[in-house]
Image: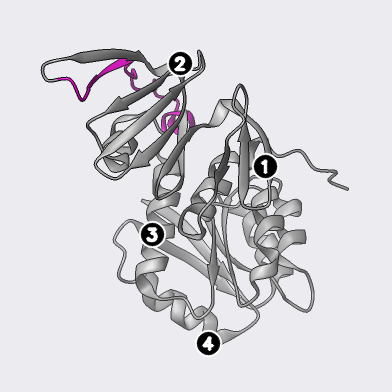
Amino acid sequence: MISCIIVDDEQHAIDLLVHHLGKVPFLELLYTSTDPVEALQFLHHTKVDLVFLDVQMPTMTGIDFIKTINGKSKVILTTAYSEYAFEGFENEVVDYLLKPIPFPRFLKAAQKALSLVESPAATGASAPVQDDFIFVKTEQKGKLIKINIDDILFIEGLKNYVCINTLQGEKIIALLNVKDLEERLPQNKFCRTHKSFIIATNCIKMIEGNTVYLENSEQAVPVGDTYKEAFMNQVKGKIMSNKK
């Protein structure tokens, strides 16, 4: 169960979120407020797992609110303005919902929050053991190739095949699709950036707009609009910024 509050200066926006919350059994609503200053007082006395937070409010912006609580609660931003997305990710928000918020998108954000609140790091439990290697089928019948997970640089989809590019410069053609590998590879080490690409996140050299550049490779990897939000979520913890 995730305890949560809603902070938004517009009551109709709160009402919609309350309606969505009522459909999600693992969310427990403790408090709503149109005044972010009053909400800060509530958080000072009450432990809350998650805050649904508007960005543009007259007395205090959502970004200032996040900086004030300093990680005490996780935050999902709710706003009509997409231009605050990157600043939100810089401040490590769980998700960024654009108004009007449809229920399926709300549920996806809530499930993401649940996975973070109940993660091994959050609960103090031991993380599950990940595979060190995989075997892949090649074009040659009956031939399997062993690939060490830590040797994978990026994967490119080629219709009914994938090309697995390694740190050693190998290009291994396997009878798989990108979705198969996305489900098997450890999510803390890999991220899908495009319908045709998966990258090793620890090998990122530079991100420029919608393009990722990797170590030991001259190929630029695209970031598709469908995958950009999840990709930025995965790298946001590594973004350094000058926080005043």
Residue drawn at 84 percent across, 46 percent down: 243
Residue drawn at 20 percent across, 15 percent down: 144
Q: Which one is in front in this view, the residue at disc 4 or the one at disc 3? A: 3
Residue 207 — which label?
1
Residue drawn at 50 percent across, 81 percent down: 100
Q: Are marks 4 and 3 in contact (CB under 8 Å)?
A: no
Residue annotated with mark 4: 12
Query: Can you name the residue that lies furthest to the left here?
Result: 142
Q: Which one is in front in this view, the residue at disc 3 or the one at disc 1? A: 1
Tag 4: amino acid: His
Q: CA distance from mark 4 to mark 3?
A: 21 Å
In terms of sequence position, does the residue under pointer 3 or pointer 2 come before the other?
3
Residue 210 position within the rendered picture, expressed as x and y whole percent measured from the top left: 62, 52
Q: CA distance from mark 1 to mark 2?
A: 21 Å
Residue 151 — which label?
2
Q: Are marks 3 and 1 in contact (CB under 8 Å)?
A: no
Instruction: Relative to 223, say whether 76 is above or below.
Output: below
Tag 2: amino acid: Asp
Tag 1: amino acid: Ile
Q: Which one is in front in this view, the residue at disc 4 or the one at disc 2? A: 2
Looking at the rendered structure, the secondary structure element under dot 2 is helix
In terms of sequence position, does the residue under pointer 4 or pointer 3 come before the other?
4
- 219 or 236: nearer the eye? 219
The part of the chain drawn in magenta is 119-140
In terms of sequence position, does the residue under pointer 4 or pointer 2 come before the other?
4
Tag 3: amino acid: Lys
Looking at the rendered structure, the secondary structure element under dot 4 is helix
Residue annotated with mark 3: 108
Q: Is residue 132 visible?
A: no
